[in-house]
Amino acid sequence: MKKTFQKTLVAGSIGLLAATSAFAGNPGTTNLLFPFISTVDTAQTFLSIVARDVTAALPVGTAAPVHITYVTRTLASAACSHFDGDMAMTANDQMTFEISNRTAVNALTGDTTSTPVQLPANANNRIGFAIVNNDIAGAYGTGAAYAGHPLYGEARLIDTATGLFFGYSTDDLHTLGAANPSFAVATGNGPDATVGAPGVLHVNKIVNWFSTGAVDTTWVTLPLNTEAVMGFTNTNTITYQVRNSNGVTGGHYNNNEVFRSSTASHTATCLGSVTRAALLDPIVATHSANGGWGTFVRTAGDANALVYKNETLMPGIFGGRGNFVTRVPVM
């Protein structure tokens, strides 16, 4: 037990260092990526965006429109749909809103300088992501003139049914400013790219899970590409397989270091989700019912992806009410 714990601690420390390096990011570019949003009936997703005037010289009330593209799918389908438009902001403004207008944030907070674009009522019970861009070269057919302000974003998700309270910053999720930004560039400026080492994308990840008696685990995978592909054609796709520690042989380890091979893989199109049993192959998934891990190795598709783990407490565990979403460490 002690040996296993020490090895796990060392592996976790290495993963944390790698993740810290990859997640450092460059704050404030003209685009934001919100990798996970929800319109489930019992959930609310709040987005908060700051558009900073770097010169601090623009008159109060100067228009600074930003374009938002929502990409969502139903819980049962892999097919995505987009919904986009220009949000009205002013320079140095803070705009906070609930994406389905379930809470009227503007009215409650006296916000008179911003007008968000929110999803229509029939876009309920969906999950997805959102991209915001105000690059000066941006052209979305709306005729708006974008100011190219550095943008800063945060998200808060609250689901009263599952006990989910999930918050994240977009600081390490944006990419280089462009009319059509690419979120998969290996320049040290995109998600999961090594800062200071251009050309190194941390496409492979480390996935692990707790005992199935305590936690039900699924993963959400967002293949990364350009805004046009992710936001409008919805053809971004990637395939992963769980493999051994050096990423060569398909399979996974249980919590006692014992390896079991398998051939199951996971293909995500637009935005994918996969259960633990499907990810590991149901026949061998029982091998690690008490916990385990493996390397998440890309085998086809786009150059990179963001991967998040969703854990739901089982009945009897801390009251059986709780849901956690965490970004998995890079390999």
Image (cartoon, rainbow, N blue to C red):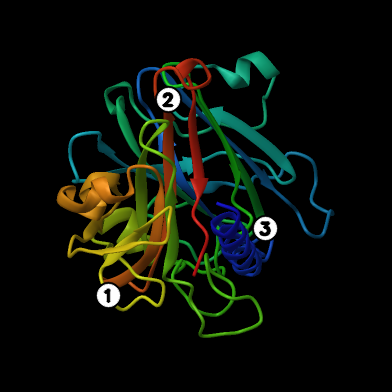
Instruction: Give the residue type at disc 3.
Output: Pro
Which residue is depicted at the point 28% across and 62% down? 236
Q: SS for tag 3?
A: loop
Nearest the camera: 314 or 20? Answer: 314
Q: SS for tag 2?
A: loop
Report which residue position mark 1 lands on.
Answer: 249
Which residue is depicted at the point 84% across and 54% down? 57
Mark sitting on residue 259: none
Instruction: Give the residue type at disc 2.
Output: Ser
Give the left or right position of residue 182, taking residue 32 as reference: left
Report which residue position mark 2 lands on.
Answer: 100
Nearest the camera: 143 or 273? Answer: 273
Which residue is depicted at the point 69% across and 37% down? 94
Q: SS for tag 1?
A: loop
Image coordinates of residue 89 in percent, x first then y, are 62, 40
Give the left or right position of residue 287, taking residue 110 as reference: left
Give the left or right position of residue 88, taking residue 113 as reference: left
- The answer to whether one can see residue 69 in this image is no
Question: Picture quarter containing residue 141?
Answer: bottom left
Mark 1–mark 3 distance (CA, rounded to whole Å): 43 Å
Badge 1 or badge 3: first in the primary sequence: 3
Mark 1–mark 2 distance (CA, rounded to whole Å): 44 Å
Crowd tier of the residue under label 1, counting other residues whose Cα lies within 10 Å: few below 14, some 14–19, many 20 or above: some
Report which residue position mark 3 lands on.
Answer: 150
Does 208 appear above or below 114? below
Image coordinates of residue 211 in percent, x first then y, are 40, 39
Does 230 appear above or below 101? below
Nearest the camera: 2 or 113? Answer: 2
Question: Picture quarter containing residue 85?
Answer: top left
Instruction: Give the residue type at disc 1.
Output: Thr
